């Protein structure tokens, strides 16, 4: 069940991060202002909505997906919160600065570290859902 859940959450993530993310959200979600937080939270909400839809479809269509409502709620809260934190950008910058990746960060590596952090958060959510 873990693999099915992970794929469903990853599809939800890709939809929210690429075709459903507005230019305004992408540009301003890390701004240190009320408008930045608003853009960030709208984007994180999109992740929660798309992952909810993906899990719903999976639960209806796939035989191996059986979900507990409290665990789904916890997983979706985790997805929204972790996505909002990672997209503030400072956690990725902090990581790269403290792990000897400053050159890679200056040459476009931050986007890869950002996506790796998101995928890790999704994997943890899928594990919790599979265990619950």
Image (cartoon, rainbow, N blue to C red):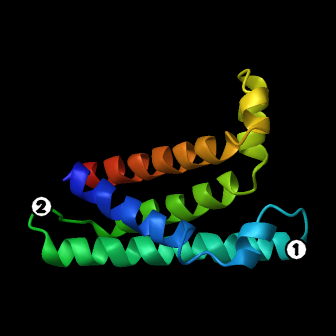
Q: Is residue 71 visible?
A: no
Is 123 drawn above or below residue 79 in the view shown?
Answer: above
Q: Secondary structure at mark 2?
A: loop
Is 66 drawn above or below residue 86 in the view shown?
Answer: below
The quarter holding residue 99 reads: top right
Provide the residue designation for mark 1: 34
The quarter holding residue 91 reads: top right
Say left or right for 35 vs 115: right
Residue 32: image location, x then y, percent: 90, 62
Residue 20: image location, x then y, percent: 55, 78
Q: Is residue 10 visible?
A: yes
Q: What residue sits 88% from the left and 74% below the top? A: 34
At label 1, counting other C-alpha atoms closer than 10 Å, the crowd grade (few under 14, some 14-19, many 20 or more) is few
Q: Please state, as top left, top right, bottom left or bottom right, where the C terminus lies in the image.
A: bottom left
Q: Given the current orientation, which residue lies at the most extreme top position? A: 100
The quarter holding residue 36 reads: bottom right
Residue 113: image location, x then y, percent: 61, 41
Q: Secondary structure at mark 1?
A: helix
Q: What residue sits 61% from the left and 75% below the top? A: 21
Is 102 drawn above or below residue 51 in the view shown?
Answer: above
Q: Nearer the viewer, residue 60 or 113?
A: 113
**Disc on the earlier residue, 1 or 2:** 1
Between the residue at mark 1 and the residue at mark 2, the CA separation in whole angstroms equals 42 Å
Q: What residue sits 13% from the left and 69% below the top? A: 62
Q: Given the current orientation, which residue lies at the most extreme left position? A: 63
Provide the residue designation for mark 2: 64
Q: Given the current orientation, which residue lies at the most extreme front position? A: 107
Is 128 drawn above or below residue 52 in the view shown?
Answer: above
Residue 8: image location, x then y, percent: 31, 64
């Amino acid at each position: 069940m873990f693999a099915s859940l992970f794929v469903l959450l990853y599809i939800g993530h890709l939809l929210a991060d690429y075709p459903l993310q507005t230019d305004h959200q992408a540009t301003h979600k890390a701004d240190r202002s009320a408008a930045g937080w608003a853009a960030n939270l709208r984007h994180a909400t999109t992740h929660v909505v798309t992952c909810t839809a993906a899990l719903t479809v999976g639960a209806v269509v796939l035989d191996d997906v059986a979900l507990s409502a409290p665990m789904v709620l916890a997983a979706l809260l985790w997805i929204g919160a972790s996505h909002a934190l990672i997209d503030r950008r400072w956690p990725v910058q902090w990581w790269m600065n403290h792990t000897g990746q400053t050159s890679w960060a200056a040459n476009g590596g931050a986007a890869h570290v950002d996506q790796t952090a998101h995928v890790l958060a999704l994997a943890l959510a899928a594990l919790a859902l599979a265990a619950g």
